[in-house]
Image: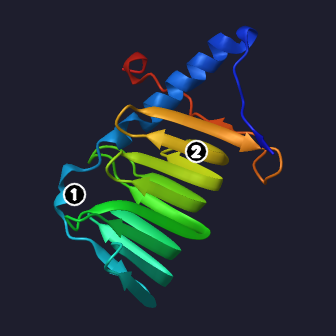
Amino acid sequence: MNQKRRIKCPRAAAGLTLIACLGAFLAPSAHALPEDREQPIYIESDRAERDGLNGVTTYEGDVRLRQGSLNIRAERLTVHTGEDNQVKRVIAEGSPAHFEQKPNAEDPPIAAQALTIRYEVDREQLKLLRNAWMEQGEATMSGNRIDYDIASEVLKAEGDSDSERPRIEMVLPPQNDRSSQD
């Protein structure tokens, strides 16, 4: 049974603070390194099958995708392309599948893993499904499902009482005020 967590009135202030911190945690991922999209996509796997009529290519067996700072590792990777032969959707499956990308030159990479990772390129949406986990620097978030709308910087996370992740968990590192140390 899917169990969504809702913020009640007494916890609203703490919940909004958590959402704001989480937004700050993931906001840089809206802008991956600009040169990433201009780089070629390299894919390695043991097997591949292309369905040209439907624009679907499936790679299996220790799959590794690399494009600039973007790295995806999975047991199975399905790439959907449109009529223009541009990538529209990437689905990575594994136990778990791994995603990593550097948002910009100054920040640490964003790392994520889940049993299924769906990236909707056109809609700029990243979905981590089943046993999901994300990390950037020392900040982490885990739950059964994490959905991130990159364009609008909206993140939703939920647990599932029938899964390994019945509740969401987040760890935010302490803020170091370096100006007071100078």
Q: Is residue 164 above or below residue 123?
A: below
Residue 36, percent from left and from top: 23, 58
The residue at the far front in this view is 53
In the picture of the structure, the residue carrying the numbered disc 2 is 146
Q: Is residue 176 above or below residue 30?
A: above
**Mark 2 residue crowding within 10 angstroms, few (<14) / some (14–19) / many (20+):** many
Q: Secondary structure at mark 2?
A: strand
Q: Assess whether mark 2 and mark 1 are in contact (beta carbons under 8 angstroms).
A: no
Placement of the C terminus among the 4 image quadrants: top left
Residue 65, percent from left and from top: 37, 72
* Image quadrant in which you'd find residue 139: top right
Q: Please report the residue visible at 70 percent of the width from the left and 24 percent of the height from the top.
A: 6
In the picture of the structure, the residue carrying the numbered disc 1 is 37
- Which mark, by number, is residue 66? none
Q: Is residue 69 visible?
A: no
Residue 87 appears left or right of 4:
left
Residue type (three-letter) at the residue carrying disc 1: Arg
Relative to the observer, which residue lies in front, 34 or 55?
A: 55
In whole angstroms, how far apart are the C-alphas of marks 1 and 2? 24 Å
Placement of the N terminus among the 4 image quadrants: top right
Relative to the observer, which residue lies in front, 64 or 123?
A: 123
Residue type (three-letter) at the residue carrying disc 2: Ile
Q: Please report the residue visible at 72 percent of the width from the left and 34 percent of the height from the top.
A: 4
